[in-house]
Amino acid sequence: MTTTPPDDAARLRAAADFVREQDTTTLLPLLLPGLDGPELRDLAHHCRLAHAALLVFPPDQRTLRAELAACGLVADGPATPSVVVRDRLARRHRRDAAELDVTILRPPVHGPDGERREVELFVLPVPPDSPLAGLAAHEREAQHEAHLALEVRHPDPLVLHGLCTLLTRHGARADGGGYNPHENGTVFYFTTPSAAAAGSPAGYRRVEIYAPGDHRSVLATHHSTHHSGHLAGPPAGRLPEPRGAHRPAETLLHLMTGAWTTQALAVSAQLRLPDALDTGTGTDPATLARRIGAHPESLATLLRYLAMLGVVTEQPDGFRLTELGGLLRADSPGSMRPLALMYGGPFYRSFGHLDHTVRTGQTAFDHLFGENHFDHFARHPELADLFDRSMAASSRMFDPLPGHPVVTAAAGAATPATVVDIAGGNGELLGRILAAHPSLRGVLLERPHVVEAARRALGDRGLGDRCRYRTGDFADVPPGGDVYLLSRVLHDWDDDRCREILRHCARAMPAHADLLIVERVLPADGSASLATAWDLHMVCNVGGRERRADHYARLLADAGLELVDRAPLPLDATVLHARKATVPGPARTPSPAPLAVHR
């Protein structure tokens, strides 16, 4: 008797619920029958459930988004190509890999104790009547790509050797592994005992052990226990282990070419190459060169490089744009084209003077251009416009904020509440909150020329009659608000100026008011994060810095505020919630600070 495998929506819902609800200590004996006592406690102490992965086959992106939304999932970044899963599918089903456009999404979820986890989705679109329908049916039933990931909290060689030995002793089989220099993480793959697959609530047969850092010395031992008859590539999104000996020189060369990637993306944006490509029909380099005014042979070289990055894909009929590359189209919702132009333009030039910053502590941008970036952009309207648009490209980090408990509580108040956006730019964040909650009123504080742009933008969205506009600097924070917003402001400034800004906020805030601060927060454990990259960018180009949560807590305390809690946002951002402290901080009269923000 055969059973019908569950559809993608049911599998996705099961995976999301599994990751949200499963306790690591309860899960481990299901994966490794017989694991109990001190060994269970030791493994649970060192590992945590990080994600569950599955391969899905939506007919189109709209259906996928609807299925994600139905499960309460929001992908917090663009899809990235999954070469490994694509190639495994091609081998299993004897297909041309070029037919299989597999991408990866990682929507975040929270576990029972509130820790961040993910559902890792490998996505292969299969429209109705597609010749891939049989492949999809087989994969849904076989679940070859489904796996669970356990992250090692504080890895060291001794701990990793012990964990691998423990898993093997309880019936797990070594199944390869690899080191990913992009994430600076090492993965160890295992297949679980057959009894575990039957006993697990989600039926996962493969487990990934993820250890932050370079642990290839341990990986070599792991590979030695991996039977040659069961070789398998690493899961999607991980780089395969190089054949033969480890080659650190090749890894370093790859890292050194990061500047080439920045320029390749910037040039493709300058030429409007993504706008000239189609996602469903290929275009040959000669035709594309005529469209955009480029040299055909040189353009073909650029296209091959972009294909390696996953921005385009080469098909028999020519080059096609991928979903990732679509984010560089000028008319794409949330287009990242302005960011590519900014990072490949003025900020690229100033990064060439990073040595000046490291040697002297002075901002490289100021050293190169003779003035800070705020003043430089103000004197060049075309750069000011590009800067504003580039910052708007990161606005997807705001998606969850209208649902923040502080905002929803204000919206449910008996009398209309007021949200004050300090240095609110073009009003993108304030507009989202006002649009989501018709009962709220808004106040936006900005420089004069920015206020006018915000007035137009909010007016175009039909929100102008619910918002007031105030020009000025940080000393002019309006009093009497219920919720205050400070989004991507503090990282522009040194600690002394941050204290002044926060004191201005505290002075304006009524006793009941809340302050929401949006920033990229440096991880306390030194793990990989966009915040670490932005910290270098801020030091080099702006003269500011990113900070850890405890650092922000100290700055808030100095201003008479206290950090209440924090929550993750898309694009590795964090929202910090602060209120007035019960015991006031040091009393000082704050001095004016110019209102400028690196949004």
Image (spheres, rainbow, N blue to C red):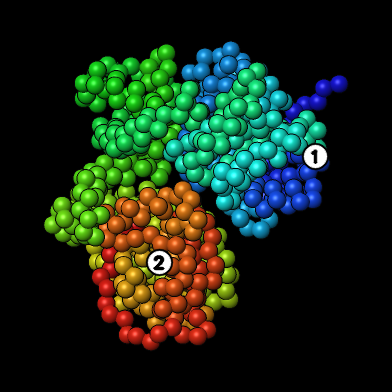
Q: Secondary structure at mark 2?
A: strand
Q: Residue lying furthest right in this view?
A: 1
What amino acid is at disc 2? Leu
Disc 2 target residue = 486
Q: Residue at x 36, y 31 (%)?
A: 249
Q: Is residue 200 left or right of residue 379?
A: right
* In front of the other: 529 or 242: 242
Read off the residue under disc 1.
33
Q: Position of residue 302 (x, y in %)?
A: 29, 25
Please provide percent x and percent y for residue 575.
48, 62
* Disc 2 packing (10 Å; few <14; some 14–19; many ≥20): many
Q: Nearer the viewer, mark 2 or mark 1?
A: 1
Q: How many marks?
A: 2
Pointer 2 or 1: first along the chain: 1
Neighbours of disc 1 within 10 Å: few (<14), some (14-19), many (20+): some
Residue at 54% from the left image edge and 77% from the top image edge: 415
Residue name at image x 31 percent, y 81 percent: 590
- 152 or 484: nearer the viewer: 152
Give how far apart the Cα atoms at labels 2 and 1 are.
Answer: 50 Å
Determine if residue 142 is in view.
yes
Residue 479 appears in the picture as rendered? no
Q: Amino acid at mark 1?
A: Pro
The residue positioned 53% from the left and 32% from the top of the image is 178
Which image quadrant: the N terminus? top right
Is 227 or 182 nearer to us in this picture? 227
Q: Return the x and y of residue 449 as percentages of the image width and height.
A: 24, 62
Q: Which mark is residue 83?
A: none
Front-most of 163 and 14?
Answer: 163
